[in-house]
Amino acid sequence: MFITNKGNIKLELYGKLAPITVGNFIDFIEKGSYNKTIFNRVIKKPYPFIIRGGGNTSIGNQNKFIDTKIKDKRYIPLEIKLKTSNLPIYGKEIDEPSQINNIELKHKRSYLSMARSKALNSASLQFYILLKSLPELDGRYAVFGKVISGMNIVDTIQEEDFIVEAKRVDS
């Protein structure tokens, strides 16, 4: 759950479909890495796109991107689960139309996905929530959860709004 300056956002995570991505996200939540971090990219024009959080920008400028165990930046591989596979595919974009149709978790409004650079295995702390369905991102970024309550709050988030506290809530 994200407690933001605008209200609460409750998330559901899909650990069986994206185990490394969900494990990474939960680890950062439990370490307090998302607490007091700013939503640093909000794209709503010319049409609703995403809100991104978990960046290096935090209130008080503390660097929350460094993993305290390894004393360096931690990166995870691109992780995409196909319906026809028992295990996710790692470190490879899915770009064939027949495989794209077979992706288990797609980029739909309210879904949660990992942000990354151009390097396929560069996801770490940053995530984004989709403000609309974006099938053009399917197979390119790891979807691992969705907003199950508080999407009305997500829709009000602007740049510089922030996560007061992120906490794990078992249902």
Image: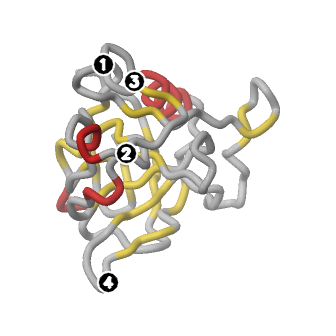
Q: Which residue is mark 1?
A: 85
What label sits on residue 88 in the rendered view? Answer: 3
Q: Can you tell which quarter of the image residue 135 is in?
A: bottom left
Q: Single out the residue that lies furthest toward the bottom.
A: 46
Residue 12 position, x and y percent, is: 26, 34
The amino acid pointed to by label 2 is Gly
Q: Choose between 41 and 103: the one closer to the eye.
A: 103
**Up-down: is 127 above or below 13?**
below
Q: Can you tell which quarter of the image residue 37 is in?
A: bottom right
Helix, strand or loop at disc 4?
loop
Left-right relation of 63 to 71: left
The amino acid pointed to by label 1 is Ser
Residue contact at pointers 4 and 1, CB within 8 angstroms: no
Q: Which residue is mark 4?
A: 45
Q: Choose between 128 and 106: the one closer to the eye.
A: 106
Left-right relation of 164 to 170: right
Q: Which residue is mark 2?
A: 139
The amino acid pointed to by label 3 is Pro
**Up-down: is 99 above or below 26?**
below
